[in-house]
Image: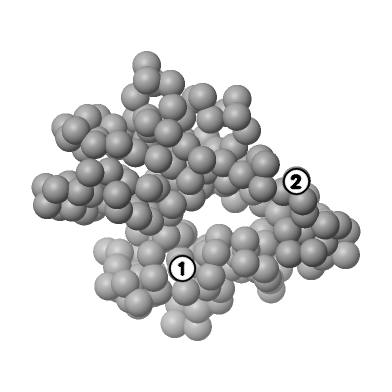
């Protein structure tokens, strides 16, 4: 089983190095770039690691989205070139004999295109935008495309890491008739012993 991380790349990845060079670079649209709004970030989303989900880049004067570390810029799955590149990379490893993939935060690859502000959280500078990127509007379409283009051609198994997915929603990802994933693991039970300040309290 191989870990497949396709929601984001490293900021040291050749695609991102090219993407940040200029607004008209061929790789610019491989990532999610936006101008600031009223002198601030494009929206008020909080990174899953804390702080803003946006990082300002002086080279072009715009921000890039990172739902996790600022060193992990999010890929733009709305770009069909990105999807094709990901599928070719998957085939590369499957042709080497990999038996399957554990798919990192796979339910976050589709974002609401308008990237609206999240609901403000009391006492916090940034807001959770998770309703706009967990189980996004095209996530099932993207996974079904992945199944057609890659997964269906190999005798393998897949398991998706799906934070914020309920058991009921998990069925949508794993129903064999939908041709998406074999299994998911979600985190409904993980928060049962969290304190008032979250999982580490």
Whether residue 88 is visible: no
Give the quarter of the image for residue 59: bottom left
Q: Is residue 181 left or right of residue 184?
A: left
Residue visible at 39% across and 48% down in the picture: 103
User: Between disc 2 and disc 1, whose residue precedes?
Assistant: 1
Q: Are marks 2 and 1 in contact (CB under 8 Å)?
A: no
Residue visible at 86% across and 57% down in the picture: 196
Q: Is residue 36 left or right of residue 172?
A: right
SS state under label 2: helix
Q: Give the quadrant of the C terminus.
A: bottom right
The residue carrying mark 2 is 192
Q: Is residue 144 left or right of residue 166?
A: left
As measured in the structure, the alpha-carbon distance from the residue carrying label 2 to the one carrying label 1 is 29 Å
Whether residue 73 is visible: yes
The outermost residue toward the top is 177
Packing grade of label 1 (10 A; few <14, some 14-19, many >=20) is some
Q: Position of residue 112 (x, y in %)?
A: 56, 43
Residue visible at 55% across and 38% down in the picture: 135
Residue in the foreground of this view, choosing between 97 and 7: 97
Q: Is residue 140 left or right of residue 53?
A: left
Residue in the foreground of this view, choosing between 177 and 127: 177
Q: Position of residue 55 (x, y in %)?
A: 56, 73
Packing grade of label 2 (10 A; few <14, some 14-19, many >=20) is few
The residue carrying mark 1 is 72
Residue in the foreground of this view, choosing between 141 and 177: 177
Residue visible at 29% across and 68% down in the picture: 15
Give the quarter of the image for residue 180: top left
Q: Position of residue 18 (x, y in %)?
A: 30, 73
- Disc number for residue 175: none
Q: Position of residue 189 (x, y in %)?
A: 67, 42
SS state under label 1: loop
């Amino acid at each position: 089983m191989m870990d497949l991380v396709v929601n984001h790349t490293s900021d040291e990845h050749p695609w991102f190095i090219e993407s940040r060079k200029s607004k008209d670079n061929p790789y610019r649209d491989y990532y999610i770039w936006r101008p600031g709004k009223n002198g601030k970030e494009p929206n008020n989303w909080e990174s899953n690691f804390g702080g803003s989900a946006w990082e300002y880049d002086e080279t072009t004067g715009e921000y890039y989205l990172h739902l996790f570390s600022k060193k992990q810029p999010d890929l733009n799955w709305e770009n069909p070139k990105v999807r094709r590149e990901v599928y070719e990379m998957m085939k590369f490893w499957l042709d080497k004999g990999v038996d399957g993939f554990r798919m990192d935060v796979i339910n976050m690859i589709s974002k609401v295109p308008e990237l609206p502000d999240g609901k403000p959280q009391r006492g916090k500078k940034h807001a959770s935008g998770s309703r706009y990127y967990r189980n996004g509007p095209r996530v099932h379409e993207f996974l079904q495309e992945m199944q057609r283009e890659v997964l269906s051609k190999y005798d393998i198994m897949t398991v998706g890491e799906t934070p914020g997915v309920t058991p009921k929603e998990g069925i949508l990802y794993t129903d064999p008739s939908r041709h998406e994933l074999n299994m998911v693991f979600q985190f409904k039970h993980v928060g049962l012993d969290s304190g008032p300040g979250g999982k580490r309290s």
